[in-house]
Amino acid sequence: MYAREVAGRTLTFGVSGMLFKDGLVMYDRQTDTLWTQVDGRAVRGRLTGQQLQIVPAIHATWKEWRALYPESRVLRKRGESRSTYDDYNRNPRQLGIMGRRNIDNRLPGKERILGIRVGSAAMAFPVEAVRDARMAQAAVGGVPVLLVAPGENLPVLAYERRVRSRDLNFVPGISSEAQAYRLGNRSALEWILDQHKEKTPKDPTIRERFNTYRFADHKEKVIDLLMRVTRVSVETVKIVEAINARLELVSRLKRVKEERGIDFLDPAREEWMLQYLSRANRGPLSAEGLSEIYHELLDLTKREVARGEG
């Protein structure tokens, strides 16, 4: 998307019918200058050398856009609602209107990308790869950038991650569940960050000779550690939640069995369940370890149900 003002003059545009690098070529009605859609440059005419100013925009599906701005007004298109390029877009082997060969095999010719350009530097980010990773960080032309895929029905967005002359590094996937996993009176994540932050020793000799630690030198390792602890934290919280849910179900099952005169304990079914879990176990948990956890869980469940009735 481009602004239409050039050198203090507002231009109106039409379609020339020509192509440049398989992209639309426009003309302005004021000077008949030809402009390429690819990068907004004037390629022929009185304004050759001028370039249209890029306006920040979001490339999204209608579903994605409505999730962000449900009250949006829509420009009604005359004629068919389908694009004349639908067949072309669906054919991965057809490149370019006149036919081209993909000379760069790092990506398929029709891979959707989000391109970022800073001065003469440019970088392409495959949209699906960013969606899979949820976020991506890089530097383009010396500018630190952050790409985020906030959700399935939301577009991929790009930001500069420099705030007040400070480059920020973001860690994906830290949820409220991870914060709930605590070591003493603080979360495991807070503990890791505290242990790795830069500290100024009080002793002047130590401060002068040995205070060489810089967080920036170790940030990648710390981020990797945070991601691992985050996963452990979330999975641990899920285990506790699953045990609580199991206790509630077993308590209800015990009441139902007692109302119908059925014994609460069923050793045969307990053994069958252990065999089932053993077949489903893919490791690295050993069969002996699984058996220990299973029987401990059974004993814990029986004790907790008895406590709940006491």
Image: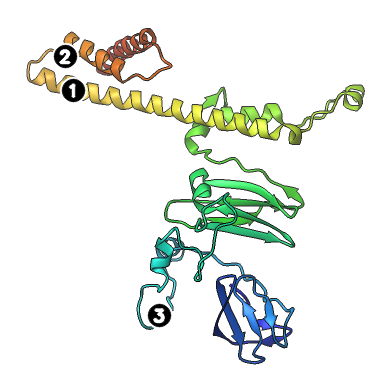
Position of the N terminus by quadrant: bottom right
Q: Amino acid at mark 3?
A: Arg
Say the numbered circle drawn on residue 253.
1
The spot of residue 35 in percent (x, y) is 64, 80
**Badge 1: residue crowd in 10 Å (few <14, some 14–19, many ≥20):** few
Mark closer to the chain start, 3 or 1: 3
Residue depicted at 37% across the width and 20% down the height:
282
Residue depicted at 40% across the width and 80% down the height:
76
Secondary structure at numbered mark 1: helix
Q: Quadrant location of residue 270? A: top left
Q: Report if the CB atoms under discs 3 and 1 are less than 8 Å apart.
A: no
Furthest-left residue in this view: 260
Q: Report if the CB atoms under discs 1 and 2 are less than 8 Å apart.
A: yes
Say the numbered circle drawn on residue 264.
2
Secondary structure at numbered mark 2: loop
Q: Is residue 129 visible?
A: yes
* C-alpha separation, residue under disc 3 versus residue under disc 1: 59 Å
Furthest-bottom residue in this view: 30
Vertical placement of residue 253 versus 164, above or below: above
Picture mark count? 3
Residue depicted at 50% across the width and 26% down the height:
232
Vertical placement of residue 212 versus 68, above or below: above
